[in-house]
Amino acid sequence: MENPIRFSSCRGVSFEIHHNQISPFAVPAPPVPERDGRWVWFPWNSGRSSFRVFPTSDAIQRSLSQQSSHFCDLTDDEDDDEDNHIAEEEKENDIEKQKPKQDQDYLKQPSKKEISAVKAKPPTESRLSVILLDQGLFTVYKRLFVICLTLNILGLVLAATGHFPYARRKAALFSIGNILALTLCRSEAFLRLVFWLAVKALGRSWVPLRLKTMTTSFLQCLGGIHSGCGVSSVAWLIYALVLTLKDRENTSDEIVAVASAILSLLCLSSLAAFPLVRHLHHNVFERTHRFAGWTALALLWFFIILTVSYDPISKSYDIRGSRLIKEEEFWFTSAITLLIILPWLMVRRVPVTVTAPSGHASLIKFNGGIPAGILGRISPSPLSEWHAFGIISDGKKDHLMLAGAVGDFTKSLIADPPKHLWVRSLHFAGLPYLVNMYQRVVLVATGSGICVFLSFLLQPCAADVCLVWVAKGVEQNFGKEIKEMVSGFPKEKVIIHDTAVSGRPNVAEMSIDAAKRWKAEVVIVTSNPQGSRDVVNACKGAGIAAFGPIWDS
């Protein structure tokens, strides 16, 4: 049996296309546009490599081309060239088998397979380098990390040398303060408020574009502060523990033991969040981060109670609430606890309707309209795993998520569609939400990255957007409902390049051209790491502000 061609897309949508002569994808794009029916493919540039989609006949079928590398894929980019090479080898072998035997014996010429075996395979980037060097060597994310860590190290040095006596006396408080800061940077409720305020304050035509793009860069890269504060909290706690051990006569074994346990849990969480571990073993990272964090928070309360109530003279504990509420550590920890508990107070089990537009993806429908640019999380078991998806909504009565069959949970949505799922009723804001800050925007999506951008077409929004979508087999892989959503818009507002018809496009060039035609203030792209990096760098090189997802966004 022939091997299927695979490609993956953003938010975990993946497909397999089997070579089949009776495939419904078997007819190439028509050389002359047709005007009657439902879909038509017009050449978008002089090279005829891109097409705009218009209504035309259902009779038009699409050819099966090799897969495009421009999909929202986080793991399988390196397989694209290999899969194409395998397909070429199989095609060459089939041709060789069809030749007369005497011709084969007479020619005795090396095949493409033999020649390609001699050629050195081009070097590929390691997964770690793709993550660490994503969109540049010293990005805003890395700058925020370095600034945060540098300020904390400076405070530690001043405290250790006696120039910052308050920090020396309250070293544990500085560790707790860093934990509060990193919790704020990941609090979906807090960030939803911050993003909303940013759009309301800066989403006006008279606000300088430079200020808007700086704000977008900062808000997208808050993970740099989160990471920097995480490392800093470990450093401050180590310093506090060293000071405590030097002054053992004025402390207790219980305080030392609890502080050591908290330090161990913080180190475990930091190691689990290391980029390569998080990328390759995301479930391990998520569960370690969650349960180690909860345990550390419980121990932190125990630590505060012990340190506040301990009397070094009598070597005993005097627990009084009046003493506790006077300590800054109490209020910092209370704020951390509230921020961590709040999302869980909004977890609900809701009815859903799941349909499968193809054997490799499912559409999940929920009740309630959602503003454009908002994302959501769903789970079959809230304590074990959560999955984030872009939301498609017209802002009225319901909303959709597109999930690909790339894991046990997403595959089960097709094999055994659930009637209910767990959701967080407070949805979170990300980079797409900041589209509302601008006046004219080009949205570039590959594969299922279209999801979060569709809402800007389906409901009234502050920004005037132009959508560029690169995908393979729109109706076959994404379903009739998605196809209908992207149709019916002016030709200059929606540009679709179907790789099943037109092959691989140069997405970066398409993005620059669309931005110039649209007179866009900014380009926002959702693609795989390499695709996003190419579009962002190309747009910036052309003097156009551009943003794409980063590995920790």
Image (tube, grey):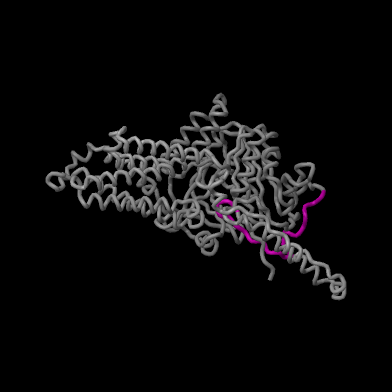
Quadrant occupied by the N terminus: bottom right
| For residue 103, side relative to residue 27 (left or right) | right
**Is residue 307 depicted above or below 118 in this figure?**
above
The part of the chain drawn in magenta is 9-31
Residue 110 appears at what percent x and percent y? 80, 67
Residue 428 appears at what percent x and percent y? 47, 43
Query: Predominant secondary structure in magenta?
Result: loop
At a point 14% along the width and 48% down the height, the residue shown is 316
> Most extreme residue toward the bottom, as rendered?
101
**Is residue 540 depicted above or below 531 in this figure?**
above
17 falls in the magenta region: yes
Residue 146 appears at what percent x and percent y? 46, 39
476 falls in the magenta region: no
Instruction: Find residue 458 and report its image quarter.
Output: top right
| For residue 160, side relative to residue 151 (left or right) | left
Residue 450 appears at what percent x and percent y? 60, 47
At a point 47% along the width and 53% down the height, the residue shown is 378
Residue 139 or residue 211, whichever sits in front? 139
Instruction: Find residue 285 and report its image quarter.
Output: bottom left
At a point 73% along the width and 63% down the height, the residue shown is 118
Could you tell me if residue 390 is visible in this image? no
